[in-house]
Image (cartoon, helix red, strand yellow):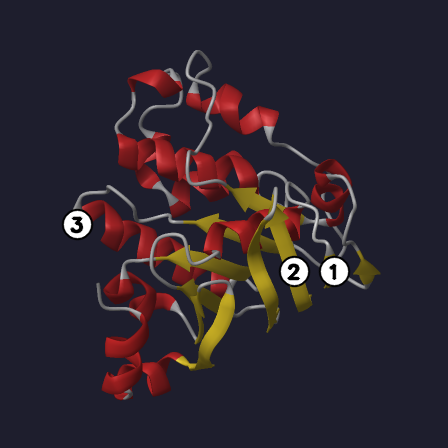
Amino acid sequence: MLKATDLHAYYGRAHILQGVSFALAAGEVLVLLGRNGAGKSTAMKSLIGLVRPRAGRIAFAGHEVAGWEPYRIARLGLGYVPEERRIFADLSVAENLEVGRQPARDGIEPWTEDRLFALFPNLGRMRTRPGGRMSGGEQQMLAIARTLMGNPRAILLDEPSEGLAPIIVEQMAAAIVALKAAGVAVLLAEQNFHFAASVADRAVVIESGRIAWAGTMAALLADDAARRAHLQV
């Protein structure tokens, strides 16, 4: 579904990604783990076209997309939910969802308001509420729901649990598990290890722009030494 091979990305002269490679399959949850500044968000932005890699390949849905404009990649069916959420504060929940609408895709059950409100019941109770009058957790749900209105084949979630109350984090985890069951490929960038462990099939640990560890989440849970070396602050 989505494959990054030997990605190198820069901000000015700073070499942020230094040969990062990973792959994501349909109906799989892969998490990018690492400390602040490791390169997780840069990897996400490279995949969606917001950062242009200096070298490496990105394959998505049968196309080589490295260097493409973000709107072209999105139209192929790659959804992106940035860490900042970027909902439209003056638009209602329903209007925010309408902004994200894209045509149905072959082989994918289209996302509708009713289906999204079943996934995020909180949103269904506030269809007419402006985005700016919602809690941080509700805004995060809306940001994900708006992206799903684009009927993505795969979705990139950058720090979806950051700053959320524990009960909202649990709801977010349940939603990600439901997306996986629906066949959506999910790539997370996370620092919350417990949240990641509850939803991810595999993990890639990035340290200083390089892959420091990769394997199944079960293997990482069993590898105390790797977690201490690469994830503890």
Choose between 169 and 70: the one closer to the eye: 70
Left or right of 165 in this view: 7: right
How many badges with numbers are in the image?
3
Q: Which residue is mark 1?
A: 55
| 3D distance between C-alphas at marks 2 and 1 | 5 Å
Q: Quadrant of residue 142?
A: top left
Confirm or deny contact between disc 2 and disc 1 (CB under 8 A): yes
In this rendering, the answer to whether 153 lies above or below 57 is above
Circle nearer the N terminus (3, 1)? 1
> How far across and how far down the image is residue 107, in percent?
72, 59
Q: Which residue is mark 3?
A: 166
In this rendering, the answer to whether 164 lies above or below 85 is below
Q: Residue furthest left?
A: 166
Residue at 73% x, 64% y: name it.
56
| 3D distance between C-alphas at marks 2 and 3 | 35 Å
Residue at 41% x, 39% y: name it.
117
Confirm or deny contact between disc 2 and disc 3 (CB under 8 A): no
- Residue 167 visible in the displayed image: yes
Q: Residue furthest top?
A: 90
> How far across and how far down the image is residue 108, in percent?
67, 55
Residue at 33% x, 24% y: name it.
126
Q: Which mark is residue 8?
A: 2
Left or right of 158 in this view: 72: right
- Disc 2 marks a residue whose amino acid type is His
Position of the N terminus by quadrant: bottom right
- Disc 1 marks a residue whose amino acid type is Ala
